[in-house]
């Protein structure tokens, strides 16, 4: 008998839990299409929250590199808090995107299977056309979400570098040293926020399209 790796076992457990969740929700009249729309909305909201956290960290770092007397330890603590908040917000975004992808795959698999149940060739053809169109729209949305997600890690890495450096070199010289990294970080955060805005717009469009079909 072939042994399953731990990751494979966990994947099966997660998949099984999600399948049970979808089945339970369907018993209460909540279908995968509705769950997908809800999860896209939740992802959009988490992206908006993440934008705020990254912007706050950038503003905190701006204040720090313009430090002109006062308590450096307090300034460092505030920057570290912003970094930790950004880290948590980014993890929430990634988790939500994974959930969106999971329910979308479940929806499309179900839709594909149900095509074989049609007795009317015309209705089957029309449903297949709608499935293909929805899949294309979702693929565009997912690419947009994953694109903005990929830009988060370099920003988090840069923020972590600054936080770690200041932690062990909490003095005016250290503040001067990180100024050289600031321009690149500012550019990366600006690009990330712009990319998230595009993803949020794509989410709004996808939600509107899905709701229009349900109306």
Image (cartoon, rainbow, N blue to C red):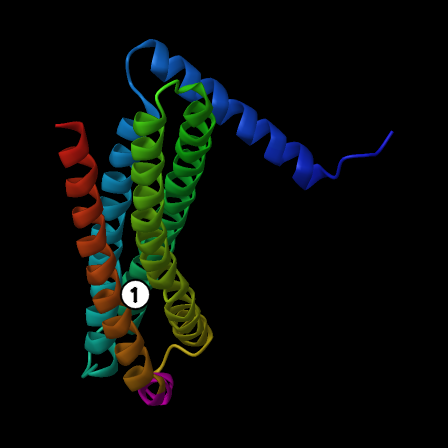
Query: From where the camera sits, is residue 84 visible?
Result: no
Q: Position of residue 113 (x, y in %)?
A: 47, 26
In the displayed structure, 158 sits above or below 81; it is below
Furthest residue toward right = 1
Q: Quadrant of residue 135?
A: top left
Number of numbered callouts drawn: 1
Kindly identify the residue that appears in the image at 38 percent across and 84 percent down.
Answer: 174
State the extent of the magenta-drawn residues as a range: 172-180
Magenta part mainly helix, strand or loop?
Answer: helix
Q: Quadrant of the C terminus?
A: top left
Nearer-the-camera pick, 117 or 186 = 117
Residue marked by disc 1? 79
Q: Quadrant of the N terminus?
A: top right
What residue occupies the far top of the structure in this picture?
A: 27
Residue at image coords 39%, 18%:
119
Q: Position of residue 24 (x, y in %)?
A: 40, 13
- The residue lying at 26 percent from left, 28 percent from top is 34
Quarter of image, res 52: bottom left
Q: Residues within 10 Å of mark 1 (few under 14, many from 20)?
A: many
Residue 133 belongs to magenta span: no
Left or right of 200, for residue 173: right
Q: Does the image show residue 9?
A: yes
Picture layout, residue 42 above or below residue 205: above
Residue 96 position within the rendered picture, expressed as x and y whole percent measured from the top left: 36, 42
Name the one closer to the observer, 32 or 110.
110
Give x and y (percent) for residue 68.
18, 84
Q: Quadrant of residue 190?
A: bottom left
Q: Give 67 or 100, whichever is nearer the viewer.
A: 100
**Disc 1 element:** helix
Looking at the image, which residue sits at the far front?
Answer: 121
């Amino acid at each position: 008998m072939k042994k399953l790796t731990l990751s494979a076992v966990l994947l099966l457990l997660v998949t099984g839990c999600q399948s049970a969740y979808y089945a339970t929700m369907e018993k209460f009249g909540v279908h995968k299409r509705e769950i997908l729309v809800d999860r896209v909305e939740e992802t959009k909201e988490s992206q908006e929250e993440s934008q705020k956290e990254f912007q706050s960290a950038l503003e905190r770092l701006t204040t720090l590199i313009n430090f002109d007397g006062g308590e450096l330890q307090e300034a460092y603590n505030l920057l570290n808090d912003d970094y930790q908040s950004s880290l948590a917000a980014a993890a929430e975004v990634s988790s939500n995107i994974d959930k969106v992808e999971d329910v979308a795959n479940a929806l499309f698999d179900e839709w594909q299977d149900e095509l074989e149940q049609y007795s009317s060739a015309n209705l089957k053809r029309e449903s297949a056309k709608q499935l293909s169109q929805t899949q294309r729209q979702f693929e565009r949305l997912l690419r947009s979400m994953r694109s903005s997600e990929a830009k988060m890690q370099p920003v988090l890495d840069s923020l972590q570098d600054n936080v770690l450096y200041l932690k062990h070199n909490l003095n005016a010289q250290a503040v001067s040293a990180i100024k050289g990294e600031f321009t690149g970080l500012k550019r990366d955060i600006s690009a990330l926020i712009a990319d998230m805005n595009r993803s949020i717009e794509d989410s709004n469009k996808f939600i509107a399209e899905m709701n229009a079909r349900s109306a």
